[in-house]
Structure formats: C-alpha cells, structure tokens
Image: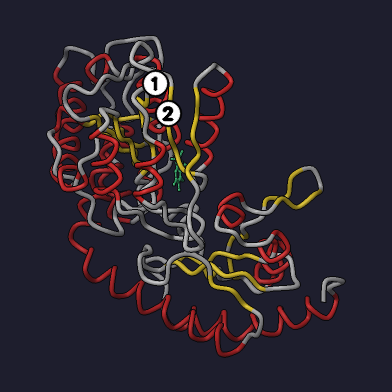
Amino acid sequence: MKCIYLDHSATTPVDPEVVTAMNPFFSMHYGNPSSMYSIAEISRDAIEQSRSTIASFINASPKEIYFTSGGTESDNQAIFTTAQKQKHKGMHIITSSIEHHAVLYAFQQLEKEGFDVTYLPVDSYGIVSPSSLQKAMRSDTTLVSIMHANNEVGTMQDILSLATIAHEKGALFHTDAVQAIGKVPVDVQLMNVDLLSSSAHKLYGPKGVGFLYAKKGTPFSSYLYGGGQENKKRPGTENVPGIVGFAKAIELAQNRSLDDHQHLQNLATFLTDGIQNLVSDVLFTGHPTQRTPGHVSVCFKYVEGESILLMLDSHGICVSSGSACTSGSLDASHVLLAMGIDSATAQGSIRLTMGRQNTMEDMKAVLNVLPEIIEKLRKMSPLC
Ligand SMILES: *Cc1c(COP(=O)(O)O)cnc(C)c1O
C-alpha cells in the first residue's frame, strides 16, 4: 500500500542524491580516517570537506563543528560537559518546560546530581518570554538551554533575545536546533549562541549522525573516552558515509530552501483550513505564524490521538500523536500541558508534518478521511 508520509518531524526519507553521495564511502573509500595510507586520506578529506560545507551553512568556522551520532548525543554532550566544567562558577542551570527529552532528561539527571534547575514556563503558544528568563537568571547561573523550534507544536523561539540575556549574566547558551536546521535560516553569529545541536535524519540525511557546534573557546569537553578524533572532543571512528550524507543534505537544503519553504507553507495552510472547515471542536496548537513551515499540530476534543493515528494508518496515512502510551495509560504530552492545555484535550492531539515529496493530493486524501474518522471515534467516545 502506498503510504502518505506526514511525520517528517520524526524522521525524513533520505534524499536519493544523499544516498548517491554516501555510496562510495561504504565499499570503495572505506579507509579509516585516522590511518596513514592514501585511501585513508580520501576519507579524511571527505570529512573536512563536509565540515566546511556545514560550517559555512550556519556561519561558523569548520573548527567549531564536532560530528556526533545525532541530536541526542549533541544535546547530552553540550549540557553535561558545560555544566560540569563550570561547576566552580555555579550550579544553577536553566531550560524550558517544552524541551525534547534529550534535553529535558539531561537536566533532570543533573538535578539528581545536585544542580539547581529552573524549568521556564511557556505561554499558550509555547513561547518562552525573554522577561521570564531575565527573572530566572542568577549570579550562579552557568548554562541556559532553550530549543530553537519545538518538535511537537512547531513553535520557534526568539533565540537572539534569549541568548543575549544569558550572556549578560555570563552564562553559556545552548540551543537544540534539530527541528530548525534545513527549514529556517540558522546563523550561529546572528543567533549569538555558544552551542547548537543538529541531526541529519530530520533534513533528508541519514540516521545516526549529527553535529555539535561549539563556539571557539566554549568550555565543553569530550563526553566519551577513547581516541583523539574530532579534535579530542569526540572519540570513535568517524561515520564517514553519514558525515558525507549530512553535508549533501545540508547542501540540498540550502539550494532548495525557498522552494521548500513556500511548498510546505502552502500544504500546511491548505490542511489547516480544511480541518477548520470540516471538523468541529478542534484546537490548533503552537504559534500561528512563528512556527516551522509544514507543521500542523491539532487537538480533536473528545477523542484520543492514538486512535486517530491508528485509523489514519489503516488508510495508509502516517502521522504522530502527542500522547505517549506508557504502561497502558495515556500520558498527555508535557509540551501541551506546559502550554496550559487541559489533559483531556491534550489526549486528542495529532501532528502532521509535511515534507518535500508531499503534494496537495496528499492533503486532500487526509481531508477525505479525517472528518469521518473523528465522527466515528466521537460516537464511540465516553468523553462526549
Ligand atoms: C529528533 C530530535 C532530537 C533527537 O535527535 P536524534 O538524532 O534522533 O538523536 C533532539 N531534539 C529534537 C528537537 C528532535 O526533534
């Protein structure tokens, strides 16, 4: 069955051009970049070429890019190692209440280890207000980590304002930009960040590769023990095909950014208007304009998101629900709850995130079946 894939915030298909770029680095140019013979030099050069491509895309210097295994590792390395390295300065660290678990659980772990953590609230759109950060800053605050674009509701933060406030008090600023890179311009100088995380598989690159940007002079360190790769900041033989694929994906994003942006925007607007007109008792979540393109997140009252997801799946449509089914009980999303949405409404959330390959026909296919699905579920629902 043909699948209409509308879950690009979870992962994206690898672009065929990315696959082509990666291919030679499996069986032909397989040398270990740390070896001394000439085939190893090909791997080494490919990594450095990729590093330059990626660095210039975010307006960084190649020396400030460290390849990792993905967004989760980049977030963990940024947060744990800067918090530990600055312990002598203070043990107060700040994040927001809507972070991805790769950030949120890292802060919770540091809290268990004795750090004092402030989890900043958000407004009903999912925005962290600069004034709330200003109020939370203390003389012993060493690190602030606030995501650029939220994965569940698409809301984007004013990173420059937030980072400037952190810097005024002498704290470092990290941002998880996994959902932003490739969709909106990301410039580390304009955003004034010290650390930034990214992952290839969210922008048509392969899974299992990411990078951490760390501004020159930022006190961070290796999070693993081993070889001297990545300027002694990330041991382990480099994922050469992955790194090459990541750079190719970035190059494609750069070339197509305007086309992609407009296309995704059109699809999302069409879908949003359609849902609004065809289904009652819906609540669109996230900021109406300050959001990533192609991102629709919506709560359908009196139904459960997982049921909608499963029924859409039976029609060959892939979306995700905001609720996670843990040990048989549905837990509402921490993001929606932080935005002040009541837990019953939050249970009915689904997220549709469009990508390059999606068409208007795909949107029409969703609008063809979604109203019936909601009606059917509401008829069966004890909540009605
Ligand atoms: C997907 C995602 C991550 C994790 O990235 P991986 O490469 O899958 O480890 C982190 N943060 C955000 C916002 C994400 O969407």
Q: Quadrant of the N terminus?
A: bottom right
Quarter holding ligand 1: top left
**Residue 195 pos. (x, y %):** 28, 33
Label 1 beta carbon less than 8 Å to ligand 1: no
Label 2 beta carbon less than 8 Å to ligand 1: no
* Nearer to us in this view, 332 or 312: 332
Q: Residue 123 vs residue 90: left or right?
A: right
**Residue 339 found in image quarter:** bottom right
User: Separation of disc 1 and disc 2 at Cα?
Assistant: 8 Å
Examine the rendered structure and indicate whether residue 164 appears above or below residue 33: below
**Residue 13 found in image quarter:** bottom left
Name the N-terminal-most of marks 1 and 2.
1
Examine the rendered structure and indicate whether residue 62 appears above or below residue 127: above
Q: Residues within 10 Å of mark 2 (few under 14, many from 20)?
A: many
* Nearer to us in this view, 354 or 185: 185
- Circle 1 — which element? helix
Can the viewer see residue 241 in this picture? no
* Nearer to us in this view, 123 or 368: 123
**Residue 187 pos. (x, y %):** 19, 48
Q: Which residue is mark 1?
A: 83
Cβ atoms under marks 1 and 2 closer than 8 Å: yes
Mark 1 belongs to which amino acid? Answer: Ala
Mark 2 belongs to which amino acid? Answer: Ile
Q: Which residue is mark 2?
A: 93
Residue at 23% of width from left, 41% of height from top?
A: 164
Taking the view exactly as shown, the residue that stands out farthest to the bottom is 277
Q: Quadrant of the C terminus?
A: bottom right
